[in-house]
Image (tube, rainbow, N blue to C red):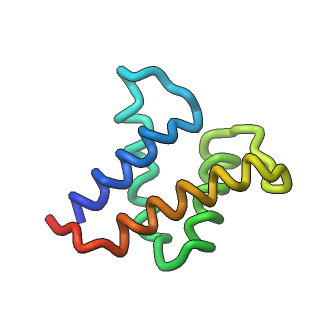
Amino acid sequence: MKNKLKAINKVFIEWNPIEVDNSSVIDEYETYSNKILQNGNDIIGLVMCLEDILINDVGLNYNPLILEQKKEVVYYAYKMYLVIISSVTD
């Protein structure tokens, strides 16, 4: 599980939706990786979880009705889903 958390965090760092600087990016997204892992049963659940993080935890002006924003969230939810279902082990 620890390796999956690290892999999810790497996806967050690649995405960097809140555009934090490189020195604090690792710690910033680590707090959300557990939440992602707990909601990773399917893509829809992950998309909803990421949207919740963006809106309620981070406070971004995210609008799921804006296609470009939605596509970005779905893309990274899929990448995180692949991590969750992979055979990465501790």
Residue 89 percent coordinates (x, y): 17, 68
Give left or right: position of 57 versus 40. right
Front residue of 63 and 38: 63
Say how many tags the image has: 0
Residue 78 percent coordinates (x, y): 52, 64
Which residue is rendered at x = 65% and y = 56% of the image? 52
Residue 59 percent coordinates (x, y): 68, 39
Give left or right: position of 38 versus 53. left
Q: Quadrant of the C terminus?
A: bottom left
Q: Quadrant of the N terminus?
A: bottom left
Residue 60 percent coordinates (x, y): 70, 38
Q: Quadrant of residue 48?
A: bottom right
Which residue is rendered at x = 39% and y = 23% of the image? 22
Which residue is rendered at x = 58% and y = 38% of the image? 17
Give left or right: position of 30 versus 89. right
Q: Residue furthest bottom?
A: 41
Q: Quadrant of residue 23?
A: top left
Which residue is rendered at x = 49% and y = 70% of the image? 39
Q: Residue furthest right?
A: 65
From this view, report whether residue 10 is shown above or below residue 38: above
